Image (tube, rainbow, N blue to C red):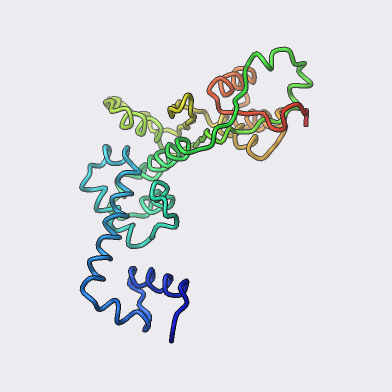
Amino acid sequence: MSLSLRGFQDAFADALYGVESSEMLTLTHQPGFAVYRNTVFKGATDSLVANFPTLERLVGTDWLRSAAAIHARLSPPRDARLLFYGADFPDFLEGFEHAREMPYLGDVARLDLLWTQVHCADEEPGIEISALAHLSPAHLLSLRFMPRASSRWAWSSDCPAYTIWRCNREQLPMPDELNWQGEGALLTRHAGRVQWQAASAADCAFLDACATHLPLDQALDKAVAIEPSLNLENCLVRLVSAGALTMANPGRSS
């Protein structure tokens, strides 16, 4: 039976991962196929290690390569741009038997993913604080802000993932005493460089709300629901100054 080009490509990819159809038997039994398969897995493993540099410093190259090699055989790349490979690697680490004593690895890995997303994101204009100063409170609260394409955030409720990630990313010593509590992170890009800072649960709730196109007053309500004592002005100024936000529908109030 003759396969179409697409059918052949699908069958070839399946065969690389051990699902061999009858049409592939002649090809897969050739010695060169095993060499090609090993090359594919090595490339995927190398990409995972390269895409998670903070994890590499945290657990060591050998440990990470071993985990990456297992994951590469279970989850092939879905994008030819291997820079984006590993979207499900954090979930894998959370269920990985050999990572049971490091339950923070999944959240730390997610911050590495966010770094790549921020690094590769499109440019969008930010918001100048001075542009908001002349607005009346009613007008300001009716506006809709959106997270910039080059901003990402995450809240880890169970562990100090941001501190662990930041210390390893910046090659700093870990604190002698690490408070085991939830932490958040905000990653943005300025002048082509990825920057990061701590973010509160309220900050993350506000950014989540902005991402769903809620007007500013409702987005701030979401933040206050998380942190009733939140200073709304400080929250807004901090996130605007960090370059996390852009204006949705500039020139319109809703």
Asked where in the image residue 208 lies, by quadrant, the reply is top right
Q: Nearer the viewer, residue 239 or 200?
A: 239
Locate residue 225, reporting x and y percent. Answer: 64, 31
Instruction: Determine the residue positioned at 53% across, 23% down.
Output: 242
The quadrant of the image that shows the N terminus is bottom left
- Toward the viewer: 175 or 192? 192
- Rendered location of residue 212, percent (x, y): 66, 40
Q: Which of 210 and 36 is in front in this view?
A: 36
Give residue 165's quadrant in the image.
Answer: top left
Instruction: Tell me: 94 left or right of 249.
Output: left
The answer to whether any part of residue 208 appears in the image is: yes
Q: Is residue 135 above or below residue 113?
A: above
Q: The C terminus is located in which quarter?
A: top right
Tell me: 104 left or right of 230. left
Residue depicted at x 29% and y 76%: 28
Asked if residue 131 lies left or right of residue 188, the reply is right
